[in-house]
Image (tube, helix red, strand yellow):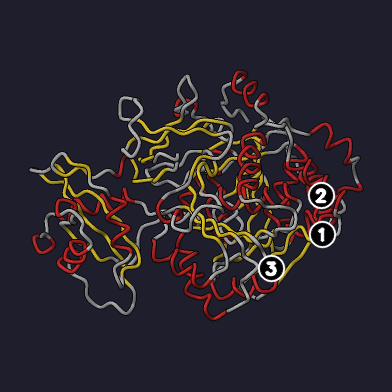
Amino acid sequence: METGITPQSERRSAMIQNGAWNDKLITDYLDEAVARTPDRKAIVGYQVTGDTRTALTYQELNDAVARMAAGLVAMGIDKGDVVACQLPNWWQTTALHLACMRIGAILNPLMPIFRERELRFMLGHGEARLLVIPKIFRNFDYEAMVDGIRSDLPKLETLLVIGGEGDRSFEQRLLDTPWEEKTDTAALFAVRKPGADEVVQILYTSGTTGEPKGVMHTSNTLFSNVRPYAERLHLTSDDKILMASPLAHQTGFLYGVMMPVYLGTTAILQDIWDADYVCKVIAAEKPAFTMASTPFLADLVKTAPKHEGELDSLRIFVSAGAPIPTAVVEQASNTLQAKILSAWGMTENGAVTMTCPEDPAERASQSDGKVLPWMEIKVTDFKGNAVPVGEEGNLLVRGASLFVGYLKRPELYGVDQEGWFSTGDLARMDKDGYIRITGRTKDVVIRGGENIPVVEVENLLYKYPGIVDVALVGCPDERLGERVCAYVTIDEKTTDLSLDDVKNYLIEEKLSKSYLPEYLEVIEAMPRTASGKIQKFKLREQAKEVRLDPAKRS
């Protein structure tokens, strides 16, 4: 398939020279792990429904990968073809990526919560020739869903179903057939081995602002993130990795699929987030590291007191996706042995900034970290000029882990001649180089010509007793341009929450009165993307109607 990548010879020369790109593939690291520790557990997978545990050593994983790779070729998968999978955090996702790498195919992981609308677009746009799905997951029939849209996907030739039957059975077609005995796999893999600058992963953006875009990465861009990430956290082959974040999200893929193989350690996968269950998994498997979004951390902190002493192996919890409330960091320090770190990144880069294990605990709630090696960041005004330390501006990034383009949409690859990519985020940088994400450029609320510090107000409201989720958006106003509308969800113990309650609380917290919300909407649930990010563009649409209801105005 023609991906639309623009050759970047100058970038390659610079990245090779500074050591950021080493031209190694994940299969190279797999080979090293098999040679060094063939009997070490490579993957331990937990399926919460059914309470089952599956474990594969590095030798067993490598054998399964060879069989799957040969089987994919027998099914007609060519070098450069897209293989899609819509799977939970099951071992087959890792094996499928490795199998694709053996034969030069491109993996396109899809979030399990996607349904017909998303799949029709993504599978069609990506021209996937083969799709792997579960038969049933969380009481949903994936096979029936795909059958319902199959006529709209002429490029999709093969459907393999884990737990399926007949010709569609993943187990019968790939795992139970000795494909490796029917071909010279060593010769096959040598011919099919991709270059480190060829596309190996396509991930669709989560759609916070509209139609998803297919982000393309190479082995060099991905590993130039994984390597310094692991180094900053001082992770080694002795540190097991726990991953309950979706493997079809860049967080799960980079640090749950790729990093364990890179380190030669064990990946512990959990397919449904359940705080009590993950405590059981931690107690049994003794992981040292995990990364997840802020709600995961909050859940774990609430559950941890019931599991005293059982979670002590967990040394590092990296939280990203939303600012960590100070209260959660304080609670974590009292209930967990793990150091809580914050990070910021995106599908296009992986983690770009992260705090350090050596930083004071409060850093995690006060900043989103400093830039990782081989990446650069800067904060500019809307004309592209760098802003002074501490001032808000557009966040730009460049460097080794920057993606290589959007599939079939080269015109959207917004990288300037100097290599800078505009992230769409607003940020401040302190004198030590630590940044704080303050919002999205499209999420800015400008009231009477003054920018509202959205994240600051949201963080204060997260501390309000009974409030679970918060999102501030602008509500159109003829006189002021915009007024501030606060959308919140509340817990089951809170029966009433008024705008006056919120305003009085914020005033007590010494917030400027010009920043106070002027509308309050209590809703059952926030609209979210597949990766859990709040879709503020949907709230902004709703907010257009809020101003018409005088009962909701201050």
Lower position in the chain sequence, tag 2 or tag 3: 2
Q: Where is residue 407 drawn, in percent x and y?
A: 54, 33
Image: 122 above or below 134: above
| In this rendering, position of residue 440 left or right of residue 519 | right
Q: Where is residue 288 drawn, in percent x and y?
A: 65, 62
Query: Could you tell me the amino acid type at mark 1?
Result: Arg
Image: 277 above or below 527: below
Q: Where is mark 2, residue-wise? A: 33
Q: Looking at the image, which residue is at 70% across and 69% down?
A: 285
Q: Distance between the residues labelled 3 and 1?
A: 15 Å
Residue 115 visible at all: no
Residue 533 visible at all: yes
Q: Where is mark 1, residue-wise? A: 40
Q: Please tell me which residue lies in front, 507 or 252.
A: 507
Q: Residue 428 carries which label?
A: none
Q: Please tell me which residue lies in front, 359 or 176.
A: 359
Badge 2 element: helix
Q: Where is mark 3, residue-wise? A: 286
